[in-house]
Image: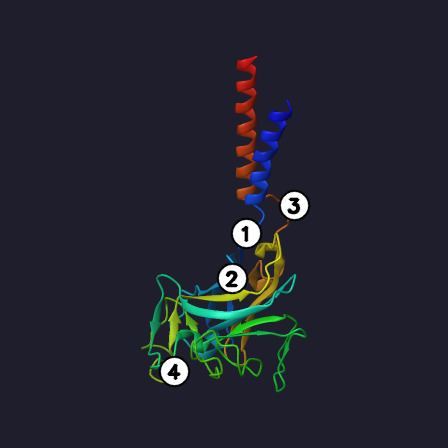
Amino acid sequence: MTRLTGLVAAALLLGSAASQAAPYTATGTGTSTAGDPIAASVSIDVSGSNLVIVLTDTSTTNTGYQPPDALLGIFFNMAPNLTLTPLSAALTSGSTVLGTIPAGNTLGDYWQYKFSSTGFTQTNSPFLSVPDKYGISATGIQLFGPGGNFGSNPTIPINGVDGAIVGTDYNDATANGGMTTSGHGPFEQDSITLTLSISSLPPGFDPSTAITDLSFIYGTAPDSLLTGSQCQNCVTQRDSTVPEPATLAMFAFGLLGLGGLLRLRKAAA
């Protein structure tokens, strides 16, 4: 009986361990200050000792991009606070670069990471104030710089809409002059993957519950922040008492194992 109990416990513990951590995901939809539809999604996960962020512009109906329609970053909170160092920025599979990256530069030179224990507050009007401690951006907006780049040139300033993410609906021919690749860019069409190293990953760290209060940065003021009611899972986390699909699947696996063991025990009796 002790052996049977031990095997069942091991199966159930396996299911519990496999379901401890999950990616944080959020989506947002709204209207920019230019009156155009904007939409974005983000996934934040742990890979080894790195935090991997996939930021995507999911807009599909914008027929004339303007600067306030440019997806330029995210703010978020995390508990416990982790010490992060930007490592790299790369196109997500299936995405493309629009425009030209100058010789000697990389895509990561257009993106910066910053941690602020007191949150982010602009010094000039419109005095944007964000209580989040973590920020990743492709535009300065009086909040980022002079360092923290993801690329090989850590002190290149980030300005304007250069490096912005645009949706698959982006058309250079119909874009506003402030959003054309002839005067700006490069742009990432669809998605970018940003990787940061974690100095000390705490045991049991789960992005899906550790990350909160996420908002998407649009425009260079920034003109728009997708947050609150515009975002699914940006502020309110999933109820941790509701088992996720992986948890249910592994629990079912454990019960099946218990049933098999009981049948074997009965046959041997």
Query: Residue 64: in sight, yes or no?
Result: no
Give the numbered dot on residue 184: 4
137 in relation to 200, above or below: below
Q: Are marks 3 and 1 in contact (CB under 8 Å)?
A: no
Residue carrying label 3? 241
Kindly report the distance in space between the C-alpha atoms of the residues bearing marks 2 and 1: 14 Å
Instruction: Measure the alpha-carbon separation of dots 2 and 3.
Output: 27 Å
Q: Secondary structure at mark 2?
A: strand
Observer-nearest of 74 and 207: 207
Hey, which quadrant is residue 183 in on the image?
A: bottom left
Task: Determine contact: label 4, label 2, CB under 8 Å.
Answer: no
Three-letter amino acid code at the position of disc 3: Thr
Mark closer to the observer (4, 2): 2
Tell me the residue that label 2 is attached to. Answer: 50
Mark 4 crowdedness (10 Å alpha carbons): few <14, some 14-19, many ≥20: some
Looking at the rendered image, the disc whose residue lies closer to the viewer, 1 or 4, is 1
Sequence-wise first label, 2 or 3: 2
Mark 1 surroundings: few (<14), some (14-19) or many (≥20) residues within 10 A = some
Q: Earlier in the sequence, mark 4 or mark 2?
A: 2
Q: Position of residue 70 (x, y in %)?
A: 45, 74
Number of the front mark, 2 or 3? 2
